[in-house]
Every structure is written in structure tokens, then in C-alpha cells.
Amino acid sequence: MNAKHNETRRDFLRLSLAAGGALLLSTSLTQAQNERNDEGHNPDIPPTEDLMREHGVLRRALLVYEEGIRRMRYGQDMPMGILADTNDLLRRFIQEYHERLEERYLFTEFDNMGEYGLLVNTLRKQHEAGRQLTGRIAQLTGAAVFKMPDNRRQLIECMRLFIFMYRPHAAREDTVLFPAVRNIFSRDSFINLGEVFEDREKEALGENGFENIVIRIANIEKALGLYNLTQFTPKLS
Ligand SMILES: [Fe+2]
Ligand SMILES: [Fe+2]
């Protein structure tokens, strides 16, 4: 067999393997879709992925607050209803749902665990501070008060503090706390936790609860011209 023939055979094998991989991938995708279709949801979503995608919604809401601060500082039009709606989404979805899951099912497992114990102590205090800020923002975006200059200044400060705290808060959970969950939960209890989260999501948010939340934050972004992702790509020469 000459070298050229060997080369051709290697190419053929490479292509066959690639095609086989693609076939396997499409088979597993189809299987996943069927499972989702049968049960109305994907039963295999790990609890940590669940929490991380909820942080994605939080980050999108922080972007809305940043835009609110920018517009108010530059005297541009900023409909208070949009900030009130964002605040309401954060309260219901992040604080009354997501954070309650963290507190009830994760933080309790890390208490008295040295460094992790200290971390969850801080995270708990930040949840409480976040709820206080959300309460103040709800008052300050009220129709009767937001036009008063002092209240606008307070509103800007509350949103700034909210962003300032929640960015590192979510980042620390994503990179330290959630990865540690896999180490301290057994495989079975990790899977079980995913099912518990799925049930809680349905109870709290109804069918397609997460998907509806994503639609809601996307509509808020659209109202402020923030939805189109390409606007965030730098124009490099
Ligand atoms: Fe948290
Ligand atoms: Fe969180």
C-alpha cells in the first residue's frame, strides 16, 4: 500500500468517524427532544445549571438597571414602569424563588463547613440586603414620587448598589458554591435535587415558567433598545 493510498484511507476513516459522531449527536438530540416532548420538560437538567441560567436572567435585569441609570443621569427619557417591572421580576423570580431555593436546599448544607460556612453567611446577608433594595426601588419607581429630584437620585443609588452587590454575588455562586455542590451531594441526591427544583419551578412559576421569564426580560430589553445582541459587539478595525 503506498503513502497516497494510506493518506486517502486515513481521510476516509476521519470522515466516517466525523459522520458517525454527527449521527450519534443527532440521535441523542432527538432522544432528548422526545423526552422533553413526552414529559413537557427536560427531566435531566442538573440543579446547578438550573440556578446558573437563572443568574443569566439576573444579569440581563442588571443590564436594564444600568441603562436606567445611564438615561436618568443624562436626563434622557426613562419610563418608570419599565424599571418597576424589572424590579418586580427580580423580586418574584430571583428573590422569592431562586434565592429561596439556594437558602433552603444549598446554604443549609454548607453551614459549619469552614470557608463555605463563611461564604454562605455572606450570601445570606446579601440576599437580605437585596430584598431591602428591591423594596426601596419599588417605592421610588412609584408614579407619585419618581419625578422629585431627590427621589430620582435615591433610585439611581439603589440600582447602583443592587448591581454592585449582585454581580460579585452571582459570580461567586457560579464559580465557587455551585461547583462545590457536586462534591458534597451524592450522585443520587444531586439528581434528586434537580427533580425537586423542577417541581418547585412548576409550583412557583407554572408550566414553561423559566421560558416565560426569559420572554418577559426580552420584552423589557426590546422596550429599551437593548435586545439586539449585535450592538454589544465592538467595531474593530
Ligand atoms: Fe444567592
Ligand atoms: Fe444565586
Image (cartoon, rainbow, N blue to C red):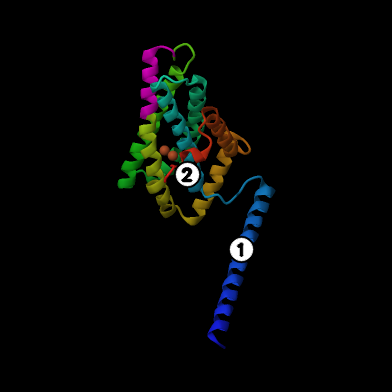
Q: Amino acid at mark 1?
A: Ala
Residue at point 41%, 52% (across, down): 184
Q: Which residues are magenta?
A: 147-161
The CA distance from mark 1 to mark 2 is 28 Å
Asked if residue 196 can be seen in this view, the reply is: yes
Residue annotated with mark 1: 22
Choose between 154 and 226: the one closer to the eye.
Answer: 226
Task: Give me the residue at 44% from left, 21% from top.
Answer: 76
Residue at (66%, 45%) from the top-left corner? 40
Q: Position of residue 119 (x, y in %)?
A: 33, 42
Residue 126 shows up from this direction: no
Q: Quadrant of residue 63?
A: top left
Which residue lies under the disc numbered 2?
52
User: Which is nearer the eye, 39 or 29?
Assistant: 29
User: Ligand 1 is located in which of the four quadrants?
Assistant: top left
Q: Which of 237/158 is in front? A: 237
Q: Is residue 166 above or below residue 79?
A: below
Q: Secondary structure at mark 2?
A: helix
**Percent position (x, y) of residue 85?**
52, 25
Residue 163 percent coordinates (x, y):
39, 32
Q: Residue at x 56, y 39 (%)?
A: 200
Give residue 191's position: percent from left, percent from top.
Answer: 53, 52
